[in-house]
Amino acid sequence: QRRAPARLLQRSPRRTRYRHHPTGGEMATSSRLDVQNPASPRVVIIGAGPAGTRCAETLLAAGIKPILIDENRRDGGQIYRRQPEGFKRDYSALYGTEAAKARDLHESFDRLRAQIDYRPDTLAWNLTHGELCCASQGVHTVVEYDALILCAGATDRLMPIKGWQLAGTYSLGGSQIALKSQSVSIGSRVVFMGSGPLLYLVASQYVKAGADVAAVLDTSPFSKRIGAMPKLLARPGLLFNGMKLLAQLYSAKVPVHLGVQPEEIIGSEQDGVTGVRVKLANGNSLTVDCDALALGYHLRPETQLADLAGCQLRFE
């Protein structure tokens, strides 16, 4: 999977205001105002995933205490999202083949947390030159910066299909949030459909969590895998992880179909999702009964803030 690159935005001259604009409830207390050394640049990082965490480490090593803003309640980003406090599920069960990376990232963040200005559960929704507009628990704040580093990560790429508005239809990322942040399955019988490595990772995580995975429906044809084999052989670790995920699904007797064409999500406004119908690679029609469906076709970078900042974007 690909991540959006970190972007660095700078401004000058430096100003020292920090404004609060309450949108509801009580005004934020003055304890939120963390006055730093005026001689030290005020650096703000958006995102507490892998890129944001490593960026904060690098800045601390250079003697700069950054402000780290993240919309989630806990660090880790999407793939390495932490489970709720008090939950003790094993790393291998929760993160599968990414368990070692997840543990390393979380331990790294724990070491630096007390040394940075960490602001979780804070949404950065707009920016102007030198000012970042945020919202947290009903309070609107404007955080000024000398340098802004965007580590916003990526989100699901989705495509419409008949019936996708029905209750019980989720993105792959949404189904992963339910599992990691709330320790629940999105349904009692779940189908995963789309393409890309995240499809197999999330399906495997659901299997390891004990969920009933009815099928994995991959829209990419088998010929694409054969064509990608030379590049995969150059990255044996990645190839091994992919084969391991497939082996886990086959071991759990989860049907995996390649080269499917989505036709319809079956159900009603009253009952929500009751199944999904696809055309198989051989031309036959297949209907799988389920009460929840997770969709996703690879990832796309989160570019909203970069676009607002006027960054040049290059699409591949």
Image (spheres, rainbow, N blue to C red):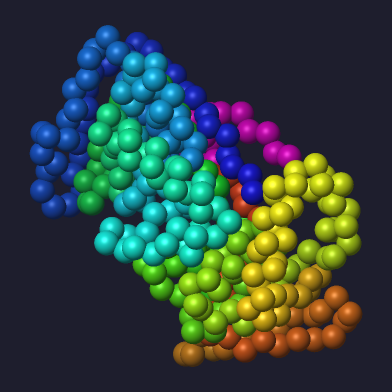
User: Looking at the picture, does residue 270 appear above or below residue 11?
Assistant: below
Q: Nearer the viewer, residue 173 or 57?
A: 57
Q: Nearer the viewer, residue 261 or 289?
A: 289
Q: Give residue 152's position: percent from left, percent from top.
A: 48, 41
**Residue at image x 49%, y 30%?**
309
Residue 197, by quadrant, is bottom right
Q: Give residue 61's position: percent from left, percent from top.
A: 39, 20
Q: Main secondary structure of the magenta part?
A: loop
Numbered disc total:
0
Is 180 left, or right, of 122 in this rendering? Answer: right
Is 106 left, or right, of 201 in this rendering? Answer: left
For residue 40, say whether it is visible: yes
Task: Tell me if residue 309 is in the magenta stretch.
Answer: yes
| Quadrant into which the C terminus falls | top right
User: Looking at the picture, does residue 18 appear above or below residue 10?
Assistant: below
**Residue at image x 36%, y 28%?**
44
Is 42 left, or right, of 232 in this rendering? Answer: left
**Residue at image x 32%, y 60%?**
84
Q: Give residue 22's position: percent from left, percent from top.
A: 18, 44
**Residue at image x 49%, y 84%?**
188
Q: Give residue 156's position: percent from left, percent from top.
A: 58, 56
Write the start and end of the magenta stretch as one range: 303-316
Task: Tell me if residue 45 is in the magenta stretch.
Answer: no
